[in-house]
Image (spheres, helix red, strand yellow):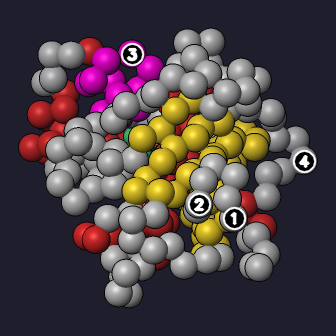
Amino acid sequence: MSGRTPSLTPPDDAARPVRHPEAPAPGELLGAHYEHCFGCGHGQPHGLHLEARAGDDPDAVAITAEFTVKPEHQGAPGLAHGGVLATALDETLGSLNWLLRVIAVTGRLETDFVRPVPVGTVLHLDAEVTAVAGRKIYSTATGRIGGPDGPVAVRADALFIEVKVDHFIENGRPEEIKAAMDDPDQVRRARAFEVNP
Ligand SMILES: CCCCCCCC(=O)SCCNC(=O)CCNC(=O)[C@H](O)C(C)(C)COP(=O)(O)OP(=O)(O)OC[C@H]1O[C@@H](n2cnc3c(N)ncnc32)[C@H](O)[C@@H]1OP(=O)(O)O
């Protein structure tokens, strides 16, 4: 097992994460935040189509998610590609920010691959924010196989950094930014950037 790098350890004065009062209710399906997102979007034929739900504990900033490994997600014959599994972890961890109602992007993602994950497997993911320090959001996730209580196949620790919506507007390709901004659906428009509507 690898050790966590120092930048993923919250400082002593970090705050406990607080679930936003208007965060989705415990157990609520989050749905895709952006139709073209590789992690969760329905408009990506080879995407992961990850389904995330707000965690059951109302006091925790936590998410559960499921991802079914398809043949198009292979690396070695019959096995999930490690980068695809890292994407599933990243997407689940990224969904936590919707519970905080903070816009944030992955700064660091440290992954352990513990067991091979065969095609056809459902990966059961659990993610939780552990601490917040200024713009820095510390979180952790596990992915289990064979059921929600099955053995851990992958795990990750992450540092997300809070950004302004300008991060996307200034750096994203103008075609997609314009299309997302012009969406008449206010909630969909906000969720494309995970902004509090
Ligand atoms: C809409 C939501 C979609 C969610 C999809 C799933 C999540 C994703 O995959 S997001 C896409 C992948 N991520 C990215 O593209 C991010 C690219 N990186 C960047 O844009 C910038 O480096 C960014 C915004 C993370 C940080 O830049 P900047 O805003 O200038 O912050 P900066 O001042 O450098 O750092 C702020 C703090 O974070 C720390 N930090 C920043 N990056 C890292 C890092 N990689 N590792 C450790 N610490 C870091 C800094 O040390 C600093 O700490 P402190 O405040 O204690 O000094």
Pointers 1 and 2 in contact (C-beta within 8 Å): yes
The residue to which callout 3 is attached is: 197
Q: Residue 91's x, y, as percent? A: 46, 50
**Marks 1/2: CA distance?**
7 Å
Upstream in the sequence, badge 1 or badge 3? Answer: 1
Reply yes or no: does residue 123 show up in magenta.
no
> What is the span of residues highlighted in magenta in the rendered image?
187-197
Amino acid carrying label 4: it is Asp
Nearer the observer: mark 1 or 4; the answer is: 1
Q: What amino acid type should be assigned to the residue bearing mark 1? A: Pro
Whether label 4 touches label 3, CB < 8 Å: no
Q: Quadrant of residue 118?
A: bottom left
Locate the C terminus and report the quarter of the image it occupies.
Answer: top left
Does 30 appear above or below 117? above
Type of residue at label 2?
Gly
Amino acid type, label 3: Pro
